[in-house]
Image (cartoon, rainbow, N blue to C red):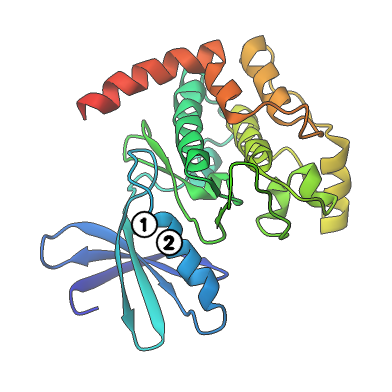
């Protein structure tokens, strides 16, 4: 820790504290995620294994780790624009234009497709884990604290983990789940970008599960958002995973595909 100057605590979670720091050697701003692994060391090692396997412009970068006393510190990229959750909350009811929704969503699709290509389930995709650049034009996926490597391309998971508001129906039913569960959660994020509100609300987890299993949500504004985008959101949140679109189908949506091509050219020059 002597190499860092702590500036501010910017987050707290079930498994650690996130602190914005100034690194003395190069004066860069970085994020230190402190984890106390003694209770569940396998969770800590899995997170490090996952985040260190990525080198992608739309996934929050991992720079290393170190131990101090009983804590492990993971050194991560700092995203000055904060989380998508804070950004949407700050809109105060002012809906995002479709162009901006598609631009941000396309980046998330690219990131999730890459995550899945590495045989990883994120398992906690939500606006709080989607982080923005200072001008809110770039969005990256972070927080792989409960992510899981799949043993094969057809592997599935059975552990009930994540944030209940973004649970897929199959997770609510206690069934094994796979990549389509991440697609459901990403569909919830798309819905939130189009409405500024979560698709499902309840005062208890059982009540929330009932609403998720019904699949009924208030549709996004048809005058603000095109039928293509609204249908994609609906297809991503089909209650049956066998009928739900996959991440590659999301990328092939005409609106998204055009933006992905534009992003490929932009990121390629970066």
Per the rendering, the mark at residue 71 is: none
Which residue is found at the position 68% from the left and 42% from the top?
Answer: 181
Task: Name the element at disc 2.
Answer: helix
Structural distance between the alpha carbons of marks 1 and 2: 6 Å
Outermost residue toward the front? Answer: 152
Which residue is found at the position 22% from the left and 72% from the top?
Answer: 5
Q: Is residue 204 visible?
A: no
> In the image, 136: left or right of 120?
left
**Mark 1: few/some/many CA within 10 Å (<14, 14-19, 20+):** some
- The front one of 228 and 150 is 150
Percent coordinates x, y for residue 264 in the rendering: 33, 22
Q: Are marks 1 and 2 in contact (CB under 8 Å)?
A: yes
The residue beneath circle 2 is 49
Which residue is found at the position 73% from the left and 59% from the top?
Answer: 160
> In the image, 196: left or right of 114?
right
Indicate the quadrant containing the C terminus: top left, top right, bottom left or bottom right: top left
Res. 211 image quadrant: top right
Using the image, determine if residue 269 lies above or below residue 227: below
Outermost residue toward the left? Answer: 25
> In the image, 209: left or right of 262?
right
Which residue is found at the position 65% from the left and 56% from the top?
Answer: 162
Task: Name the element at disc 1.
Answer: loop
Per the rendering, the mark at residue 52 is: 1
Percent coordinates x, y for residue 47 in the rendering: 47, 62
Res. 237 image quadrant: top right
- The front one of 160 and 191 is 160
Outermost residue toward the bottom? Answer: 69
> In the image, 267: left or right of 247?
left
Percent coordinates x, y for residue 190 in the rendering: 60, 31
**Mark 2: few/some/many CA within 10 Å (<14, 14-19, 20+):** some
Percent coordinates x, y for residue 258 in the rendering: 44, 12
């Amino acid at each position: 820790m002597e190499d860092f100057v702590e500036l501010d605590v910017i987050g707290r979670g079930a498994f650690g504290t996130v602190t914005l720091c100034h690194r003395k050697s190069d004066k860069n701003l970085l994020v230190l995620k402190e984890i106390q692994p003694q209770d569940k060391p396998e969770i800590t090692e899995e997170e490090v294994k996952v985040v260190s396997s990525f080198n992608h412009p739309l996934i929050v970068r991992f720079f290393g780790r170190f131990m101090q006393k009983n804590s492990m510190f993971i050194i991560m990229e700092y995203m000055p624009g904060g989380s998508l959750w804070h950004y949407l909350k700050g809109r105060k009811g002012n809906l995002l234009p479709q162009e901006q929704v598609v631009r941000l969503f396309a980046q998330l699709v690219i990131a999730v497709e890459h995550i899945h290509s590495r045989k990883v389930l994120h398992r906690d995709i939500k606006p709080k884990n989607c982080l923005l650049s200072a001008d809110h034009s770039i969005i990256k996926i972070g927080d792989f604290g409960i992510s899981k490597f799949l043993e094969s391309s057809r592997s599935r998971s059975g552990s009930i983990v994540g944030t209940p508001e973004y649970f897929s129906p199959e997770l609510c039913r206690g069934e094994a789940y796979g990549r389509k569960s991440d697609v459901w959660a990403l569909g919830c994020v798309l819905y939130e970008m189009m409405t500024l509100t979560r698709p499902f609300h309840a005062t208890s987890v059982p009540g929330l599960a009932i609403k998720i299993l019904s699949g009924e949500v208030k549709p996004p504004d048809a005058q603000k958002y095109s039928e293509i985008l609204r249908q994609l959101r609906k297809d991503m949140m089909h209650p049956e995973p066998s009928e739900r679109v996959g991440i590659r189908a999301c990328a092939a949506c005409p609106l998204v595909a055009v933006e992905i091509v534009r992003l490929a050219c932009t990121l390629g020059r970066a």
